[in-house]
Amino acid sequence: MSTIKLTVNGRAVSVDVEDRTLLVHLLRENLNLTGTHIGCDTSQCGACVVHVDGRAVKSCTMLAGQAAGSNVTTIEGLAKGDELHPMQAAFRDNHGLQCGYCTPGMIMSAVDIVHRHGGKLDEETVRHELEGNICRCTGYHNIVKAVLDAASRMKVAQAAE
Amino acid sequence: MYETTYHRASSVDDAVALFGKGTEAKFLAGGQTLLPVMKQRLAAPSDVIDLSKVKELIGIEPTGDGIVVRAATTHYDVATSNVVQKAIPALAHLASLIGDPAVRHRGTIGGSLANNDPAADYPAAVLALGATIKTNKRTIAADDFFKGLFATALEDGEIITAVSFPVQAKAGYAKFPNPASRFALTGVFVARTPAGDVRVAATGASQSGVMRVGPIEAALKANWSAGAIDGVTIPSAGLLADIHGSAAYRANLIKVMAQRAVITAG
Ligand SMILES: Cc1cc2nc3c(=O)[nH]c(=O)nc-3n(C[C@H](O)[C@H](O)[C@H](O)COP(=O)(O)OP(=O)(O)OC[C@H]3O[C@@H](n4cnc5c(N)ncnc54)[C@H](O)[C@@H]3O)c2cc1C
Ligand code: FES
Ligand code: FES
């Protein structure tokens, strides 16, 4: 057992877990943040994507101990109170989800993509960069539309700041 | 995953000492290979020694005639490094094709080389560019490093600390990715040295891991152009055959990827 101290969605937390605990299990089982999903056991589906120190990572492929001292953001940390993050709003407006299982990981990956590419995002880049996120329902078209829509909303929001 | 004990190393010396204390210790870098294997209970290290926060193992520096990439540098940092993009753009391009963004944010060059997956990308660049692998004990030439499927010249407990890449006159990489895993169904790295020698390495194709491709090297040495590869015959003996492609299919892919790599190299 080890005591892991980290910051999750802006809140400092300290949890006692076995060393073999994966970050995704710490989030879901110790912190009850069940928005982060587990969709595979081969590190391929991306349902578990969260941000660790500002970078999108698969939380099923990182030990909790590796995240000690880090700043973690999960899907629960995106909205400001009742106001959805522009990416969440764009997924809703563009019908970017059906069953919703892949959606938290999609949104966390998508926010990371927009942060890295800013206004220079085009459809080809979005498709290439979403390769690590698998969706069994939508056929991806509306997800790509949502990401591009959110990218322009986020640019406008940034310009207004 | 079986039980294990996690250690975060503070330096290379600390990592070596921690490794010595474990009964069946393993180094952990990005974890993008080791953790999936541990999750499937195909590996059960008593101790995992995390190298990913060791400062002396992270970073990229230009040298007089090349670049040095330290072992725990992530694929993402190689893909986006100005130093790499300027000196060896083909290497930055290769790193940008590994897996997906989340894998690139964690996976490291040292982990990829130590693992020597027969379909991994970096081994092709290291072999074709004639890079040198530095460890905590010695320096190993690329030609002596890869020893077949998942096997390398590394001894038990030896740590890759950096990879030193010479800048060549021309370099290019093209891969046909497996559409599901993104690993190379076949990937080919081509390089021409300032003296006019040619080195070509293929990954994903051979049953014994990354390999030099002599017939294409000879053709490109005589005439550096995609067309020069048209008449080359690649024997399919010893090539991988699986659900994704036969040996003959991979033999042809080696030619096609080499041609595309030459075109990107210019
Ligand atoms: C979904 C997915 C897709 C992928 N697609 C690709 C792809 O397209 N192309 C590709 O090439 N790879 C791909 N990979 C593998 C990825 O590149 C890994 O990052 C890489 O193979 C291992 O690097 P790591 O830092 O994660 O190593 P780890 O998993 O931490 O370690 C791997 C092995 O190397 C050893 N090791 C690590 N660092 C050192 C060191 N410095 N010295 C000595 N030994 C060390 C460890 O003990 C372990 O045995 C993919 C992985 C995933 C999960
Ligand atoms: S749960 Fe599928 S990649 Fe993490
Ligand atoms: S919406 Fe169902 S898996 Fe993507």
Image: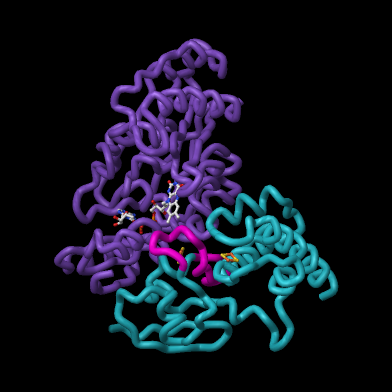
Chain colours: A cyan, B purple
Q: Is residue A131 visible?
A: yes
Q: In which quarter of the image is residue B21?
A: bottom left
Q: x%, y% of residue A37?
A: 49, 73
**In percent of the image, x 45 and y 21: which residue is there?**
B198
Asked if residue B6 is positioned above or below residue B220 in the image, the reply reads below
Q: Residue drawn at (55%, 70%), measured in percent from left and top?
A: A101
- Marker count (numbered): 0
Q: Where is residue B132 in the image (x, y as percent from the top left)?
A: 36, 39
Tell whether position A50 is magenta. yes
Quadrant of res B247: top left
Instruction: Tell me which segment is drawn in magenta.
Output: A39-57
Depth check: give the residue in front, B127 or A147. Answer: A147
Q: Residue furthest left?
A: B23
Q: Which of the pair A98/B30 is nearer the observer?
A: A98
Q: Can residue B130 be seen in this view?
A: no
Q: In this view, does A46 lie above or below B86?
A: below
In percent of width and height, residue B18 lies at 23, 68
- Residue A146: x and y in percent read 72, 63
Q: Is residue A29 above or below residue B90?
A: below
Q: Is residue B9 magenta?
A: no
Position of the N terminus of chain B by quadrant: bottom left
Q: Residue at x 32, y 49 (%)?
A: B115
Question: Main SS type for the magenta part?
Answer: loop
Q: In this view, does A116 lie above or below B256?
A: below
Q: Quadrant of the C terminus of chain B?
A: top right
